[in-house]
Amino acid sequence: MLSRSYLKTAGILALILISLTTITGTNISDPLLKNVIVSVSKMSNSPQDNVNDSVSIVVTGNATFGTLAADNILSSPQPINIKSTSNVPVNIDVKALNWTSTNGNMPLSSLKFASSHRAMTTDDQNAITNLEPSSAQDVNLYIQVPFGSLPKSYSTTITWTASQVT
Amino acid sequence: MESLKKIVVFVFGLVMVLGVTPAFADSSPSGTNGVTVGVSPSVSIVVSNNADFGSLAANNILSDAQPINIASTSNVPIVVNVKAADWTSIGGNMPLSALLWGTTPMTTNNAVAIANMTAPTPTTTSAQDVNLKMKVPFGSLPGAYNTTVTWTASDAS
């Protein structure tokens, strides 16, 4: 003979399975089981309601351009990989801090991005439009060192920010 | 108590079945990357204009000036030297020294034309005119005379 506890366990399992398809729970008399069913029904009536929109990205790669001449010539591209770990389409904006250097005079605009070679600024600019969930895209960075840029080492940090496509 | 444990176990199991586990992974709507670049010292100039004096008399009189613009595209201070090749002419006899930069006769050897030219900045230019003049000596044979003037920059820092 099965014990009462085994029967109860089997009953709970059966009810959970039912709840995964259509949840009613109206015939449940055991107060404990009813409580379980109530909590299940909240999640399974419309499962999508319980998965919040999430917006997140993973940025891979650092751009090291080596040493360049101040010749106003565009450098070779350095790709930065932006992977969306969101569950909704996102737009990606990019901005950068001003160069860190010791008495350097090179403007931040010497740093370019994307195929259109747009000049980087300290304000957000759109870099990728409508990046699908779980997809990735490279964005190329370039340097165009203007004439007269002092021979120094320059570094900066670029921030890529995702926002949900509205 | 036993029933409560079972309920807890089943609730967690159900949560896992429904795929609504809380996200513990580190996720963020933004990410960063670094950029580094070194800029090397560079010495370069841009020379504009050709000097065309037209026809002059062999009267040993200084001609009008023909300005040559020297623009630095360096990122260090520079010295600019100047020299010229001997005249190219057919049967001519005018010496190269008939050509002057400023008041100094030209030679085939480098001479300092601009001693310390500052570097431009990304937002400003650095340029200077050097005047070329002719002083055709008496007895210079009539003819066309041509030469090439070479301006050479070097690091003055």
Image (cartoon, coloured by chain):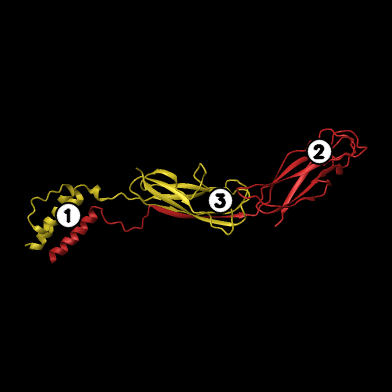
Chain colours: A yellow, B red
Chain at numbered mark 2: B
SS category of the residue bearing label 1: helix
User: In the image, is residue A4 above or below residue A20?
Assistant: below
Residue B136: quadrant of the picture: top right
Residue B41: quadrant of the picture: bottom right
Residue designated by label 2: B64
Q: Amino acid at mark 1?
A: Ser
Residue B129 in sight = yes
Q: Position of residue A27 (x, y in %)?
A: 7, 51
Looking at marks 1 and 3 on the same chain, the residue that comes earlier in the sequence is marked by 1
Q: Residues within 10 Å of mark 2 (few under 14, many from 20)?
A: few
How far apart marks 1 and 3 lie (CA) works out to: 58 Å
SS category of the residue bearing label 2: loop
Q: Indicate which disc residue A39 carries.
A: 1
Question: Which quadrant does the N terminus of chain B fall into?
Answer: bottom left
Residue designated by label 3: A107
